[in-house]
Image (cartoon, helix red, strand yellow):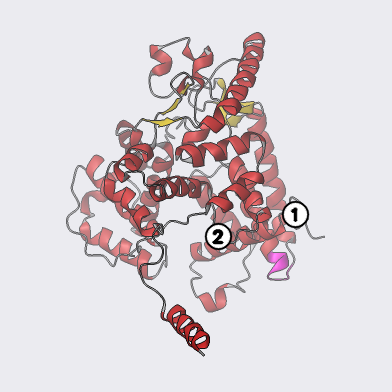
């Protein structure tokens, strides 16, 4: 008997899209890179198991590996039109693992900022790289990305430990990067991430500088940011409500990144001076942005509800929030104080993988994009809109209003004004600089008709 196709009604297109992605990655993992015959490749359960083990070793949690199995089963049924009976035992086993892990964690989520303890079973090169990255102040997301790129390099060059790197040099890095660009057909950003990860590993762990790399590089052309008009922004905002509407207004009204908005703490709101403090932003920087007048009432309302939730947590003895770096040691009682609590709090507690302590964390990163996507569809906007598009709109609309670009640079937190200059490419205040020949042709004909 075939397994259920889709886990949630109404999400068929999205799950089918992920099914195709996981199938492609499975095919590449097993060396089936021939695009012509890749689509009809009939994979078996053993090949899926081997692929899942590689993802487990790469740090993929059980719930994500469960999604991989479901995706491959969907591909079997929908695309290949074949039975997925041999994958059903894998699905059931992975569901048991997920349940067991959740039971072990008392049903709580994991705090994504907390890196957790370093796995002693990982190769020593990986362990040393993790230690070096954390000492260097790298974010957890960057650590995961860089470690993944190093693992791919080690697998490509059959390296198993730190001692194997003694004979590895620039030529090996060049070959690996060239293979990614030519045979791997990866995106430029993926190859560039691999390049920077290996440079970091050579510098921090091997204490060697990579020389001039002559690999075939995947070039990423200059990308012009997508910008919505005032009307489009209004239509999208009209399609949101509650906390997601407030977050969207913060993104557009303050130029925040989505990570900055959901990580706002109570202490970051300065109502008297009408400003918002943004800390631990990209690059570990902080900045101050004006608090929009249109958001004051909503932010005060959320602050009151957050205070009520905190008082409930205090009464239950569960009031606590995750604090970065050594703040928890420097201020032992800070994690229970209202000022340090996240403004947009999660409805359930989360576990710190390093200490095992329970905290009330902020909303998950994946929550807002789902609601935003639905609002964009209701607004019937065909542009590719993401959370970051609001930040582009903030900068571009300020530029159109005549705001000095240096001030925009300060509000965005850019270190170099050259980064901010990209918004000058979408400045259409004065109309098109070049009149299209088509418009000239139509205009000349209209003039001729009027003359007759």
* Residue 428 position in % (x across, y down): 41, 59
Residue pointed to by mark 2: 383
For marks 1 and 2 on the same chain, the one whose residue lies earlier in the sequence? 1
Give the answer, above or below, for where 266 lies relative to 179: above
- Find the magenta span and give its range: 76-82
The secondary structure type at the circle numbered 1 is loop
Residue 163 makes an appearance in the image: no
Describe residue 151's horizontal placement relative to residue 261 as left or right. left
Camera-side residue: 231 or 284?
A: 231
Dot label at residue 10 = 1
Q: Is residue 171 above or below residue 443?
A: above
How many numbered marks appear? 2
Residue 77 within the magenta-colored segment of the rendering: yes
Residue 37: give x, y in percent of width and height: 56, 77
* Closer to the camera in the image, 247 or 260: 247
**Residue 389 image point, x, y percent:** 49, 50
Residue at position x 66%, y 57% from top?
Answer: 15
Mark 2 nearby-residue class (10 Å; few <14, some 14–19, many ≥20) = few
Asked whether residue 38 is in view, the answer is: yes
Q: Taking 6 as reference, is 62 left or right? A: left
Please name whichever residue, 99 or 382, is drawn nearer the observer in this view of the structure.
382
Magenta highlight on residue 291: no
> Residue 132's image quarter?
top left
The residue lying toward the viewer, choosing from 334 and 403, is 403
In this view, the mark in front (1 or 2): 2
Residue ID at (58%, 53%): 232
Against 183, residue 235 (above or below) is above
What is the quadrant of the N terminus in the image?
A: bottom right
Query: Residue at (37%, 53%) from the top-left corner?
Result: 423
Q: Residue 303: x, y in percent?
A: 58, 21
Compared with residue 220, is residue 423 higher up or lower down, i.e. above or below?
above
């Amino acid at each position: 008997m075939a397994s259920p196709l889709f886990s949630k009604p109404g999400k068929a297109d999205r799950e089918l899209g992920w099914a195709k992605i996981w199938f492609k990655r499975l095919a590449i993992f097993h060396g089936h890179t021939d695009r012509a015959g890749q689509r009809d490749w009939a994979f078996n359960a053993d090949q899926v198991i081997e692929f899942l083990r590689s993802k487990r070793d790469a740090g993929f949690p059980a719930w994500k590996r469960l999604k991989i199995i479901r995706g491959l089963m969907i591909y079997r049924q929908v695309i290949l039109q074949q039975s997925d009976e041999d994958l059903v035992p894998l699905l059931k086993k992975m569901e048991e693992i997920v349940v067991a892990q959740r039971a072990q964690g008392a049903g709580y989520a994991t705090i994504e900022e907390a890196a957790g303890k370093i796995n002693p079973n990982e190769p020593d090169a990986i362990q040393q790289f993790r230690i070096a990255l954390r000492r260097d102040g790298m974010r957890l997301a960057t650590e995961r990305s860089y470690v993944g790129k190093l693992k791919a390099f080690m697998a490509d060059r059959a390296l198993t430990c730190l001692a194997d790197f003694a004979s590895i040099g620039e030529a090996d890095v060049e070959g690996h990067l060239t293979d990614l660009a030519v045979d791997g057909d990866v995106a430029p950003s993926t190859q560039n991430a691999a390049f920077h990860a290996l440079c970091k590993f050579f510098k921090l762990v091997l204490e060697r500088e990579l020389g001039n790399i002559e690999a075939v590089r995947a070039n990423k052309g200059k990308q012009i940011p997508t910008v919505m008009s005032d009307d489009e922004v209004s239509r999208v905002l009209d399609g949101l409500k509650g906390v997601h509407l407030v977050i969207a207004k913060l993104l557009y009204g303050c130029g925040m990144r989505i990570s900055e908005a959901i990580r706002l703490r109570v202490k970051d709101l300065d109502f008297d001076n009408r400003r918002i403090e943004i800390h631990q932003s990209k690059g570990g920087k902080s900045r101050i942005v004006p608090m929009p007048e249109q958001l004051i009432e909503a932010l005060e309302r959320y602050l009151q509800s957050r205070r009520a939730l905190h008082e409930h947590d205090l009464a239950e003895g569960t009031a606590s929030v995750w604090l970065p770096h050594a703040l928890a040691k420097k201020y032992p009682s800070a994690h229970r104080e209202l000022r340090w609590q996240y403004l947009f709090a999660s409805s359930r507690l989360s576990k710190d993988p390093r200490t095992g302590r329970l905290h009330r964390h902020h909303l998950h990163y994946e929550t807002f994009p789902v609601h935003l996507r639905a609002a964009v569809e209701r607004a019937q906007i065909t542009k590719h809109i993401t959370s970051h598009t609001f930040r582009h709109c903030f900068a571009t609309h300020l530029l159109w209003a005549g705001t000095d670009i240096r001030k925009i640079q300060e509000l965005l937190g850019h270190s170099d004004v050259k980064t901010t200059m990209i918004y000058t490419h979408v400045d259409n205040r004065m109309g098109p600089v070049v009149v299209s020949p088509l418009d000239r042709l139509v205009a000349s004909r209209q003039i001729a008709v009027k003359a007759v």
